[in-house]
Image (cartoon, coloured by chain):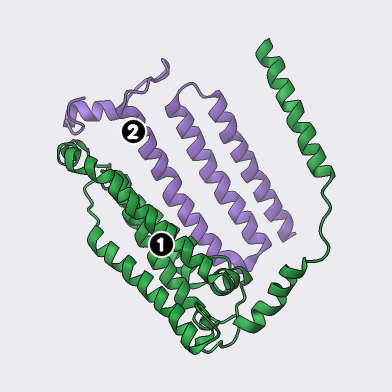
Chain colours: A green, B purple
């Protein structure tokens, strides 16, 4: 009885809060000055159809570089923290895993190319529609996760993945320096021709940066997932 | 007219999804719940996507991909779930008549020792 009264009380409180929130909401009819500047200038200056990607990679490119660095540190620290367990238990635990059933194996084999293709699509279309390097990289890593879950015997080449990841990161910084030399500043993507907005090859170096981000994030998350498995 | 057909399809899909939710509440054990959830949500999703195709004929290739994805993931994932549940000896409802997976394990000895 007490429980019910308590639950009823909590629900009423929530209802009051949400009614106040919903009642006080008025739809904004105009953009804020900062947003208006971005919305008007991004397609002209950068040639991107997806303004969010333009902001993420061009205007706030340095911020994105910091995010990638954070992700890199997470991957490195996860590797450091889990290495001990791997050395002790990895060999003893591995033979106990039973193989997944045939249906799961076949399903994962059919789905994996679809998921990876979708990830690549999201990465490459970052400057045209919703998507970009981070999202596409996460999709690619989810495909890798499916592979590792469905087939416990599968081994990832972690060394090669780390190499790819470092290479993508270096190329990303190299792009930034190119922007510094050839265009307006560090990570300025306008050192390549802008092209026609809305086509696949447009918006300067944004698609290249997006692809590099996707490769880097995908490889990084795959390495993290691989670490957690053993 | 075409939009009416689409709406009816979406409505029937919603009815199937509702029956999946009802099945999750009303079914007696985890295996029957998984089954109710899988079958009804697969059909419900497909019906809703087909209904959408009537509204937006231009989306048909992408919607076909969505249907393919649902058909590939939903049954396979609940297959894996229920197999895992069977391996850890999740209790079944007393009304269960046959346990084909256990029989299969006994005769073929494919599942190995418990």
Q: Chain of mark 2?
A: B
Chain bearing mark 1: A
Q: Is residue A217 above or below residue A97?
A: below
**Mark seen at residue B71:** none
Instruction: Give the quarter of the image for residue A129.
Output: bottom right
Q: Position of residue A18 (x, y in %)?
A: 76, 38
The secondary structure type at the circle numbered 2 is helix
Q: Is residue A55 left or right of residue B3?
A: left
Is residue B110 toward the left or the right of residue B19 in the image?
left
Residue at far top of view: A1
Residue A205: x %, y % from top left: 49, 81
Disc 2: CA contacts within 10 A as few (<14), some (14-19) or many (>=20): few
From the image, state whether disc 2 or disc 1 is nearer to you. 1
Residue A70: image location, x then y, percent:
43, 57
Q: Is residue B90 left or right of residue A56?
A: left
Check if mark 2's residue and mark 1's residue have beta carbons within 8 Å. no
Tell me residue B112's x, y (percent): 17, 30
Distance Cα–Cα, label 2 vs label 1: 31 Å
Q: Quadrant of the C terminus of chain A?
A: top left
Q: Residue under circle 1?
A: A217
Res. A114 visible in picture: no
Work out whether residue B114 can be spotted: yes
Image position of A159 (left or right of B57) = left
Mark 1, residues whose alpha carbon is within 10 Å: few (<14), some, or many (≥20)?
Answer: many
A133 is higher (above) or lower (below) than B101: below
The image quarter containing residue A15 is top right
A81 versus B31 height, above or below: below
* Residue drawn at 35 percent across, 61 percent down: A219
Residue bearing the label numbered 2 = B84
Residue at image coords 59%, 50%: B47
């Amino acid at each position: 009885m007490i429980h019910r009264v308590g639950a009823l009380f909590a629900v009423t409180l929530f209802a009051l809060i949400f009614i106040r929130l919903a009642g006080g909401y008025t739809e904004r009819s105009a953009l804020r000055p900062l947003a208006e500047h971005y919305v008007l200038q991004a397609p002209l200056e950068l040639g991107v159809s997806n303004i969010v990607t333009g902001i993420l990679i061009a205007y706030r490119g340095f911020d994105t570089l910091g995010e990638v660095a954070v992700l890199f540190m997470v991957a490195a620290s996860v590797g450091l923290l889990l290495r001990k367990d791997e050395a002790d238990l990895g060999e003893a635990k591995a033979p106990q895993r039973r193989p997944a059933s045939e249906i799961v194996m076949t399903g994962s084999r059919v789905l994996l190319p679809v998921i990876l293709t979708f990830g690549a699509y999201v990465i490459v279309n970052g400057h045209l529609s919703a998507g970009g390097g981070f999202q596409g990289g996460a999709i690619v890593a989810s495909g890798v996760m499916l592979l590792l879950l469905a087939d416990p015997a599968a081994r990832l080449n972690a060394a090669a993945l780390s190499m790819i990841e470092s290479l993508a990161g270096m190329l990303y910084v190299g792009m930034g320096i190119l922007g510094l030399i050839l265009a307006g500043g560090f990570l300025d993507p306008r050192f390549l021709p802008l092209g026609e907005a809305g086509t696949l090859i447009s918006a300067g170096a944004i698609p290249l940066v997006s692809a590099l981000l996707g490769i880097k994030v995908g490889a990084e998350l795959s390495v993290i997932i691989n670490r957690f498995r053993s | 007219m075409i939009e009416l057909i689409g709406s009816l399809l979406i409505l029937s899909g919603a009815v199937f999804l509702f029956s999946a939710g009802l099945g999750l509440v009303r079914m007696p054990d985890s295996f029957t719940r998984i089954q109710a959830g899988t079958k009804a949500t697969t059909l419900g999703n497909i019906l809703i996507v087909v209904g959408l195709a009537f509204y937006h004929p231009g989306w048909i290739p992408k919607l076909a991909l969505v249907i393919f994805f649902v058909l590939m993931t939903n049954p396979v994932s609940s297959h894996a779930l229920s197999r895992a549940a069977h391996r850890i000896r999740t209790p079944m409802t007393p009304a269960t008549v046959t346990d084909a997976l256990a029989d299969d394990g006994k005769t073929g000895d494919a599942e190995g020792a418990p």
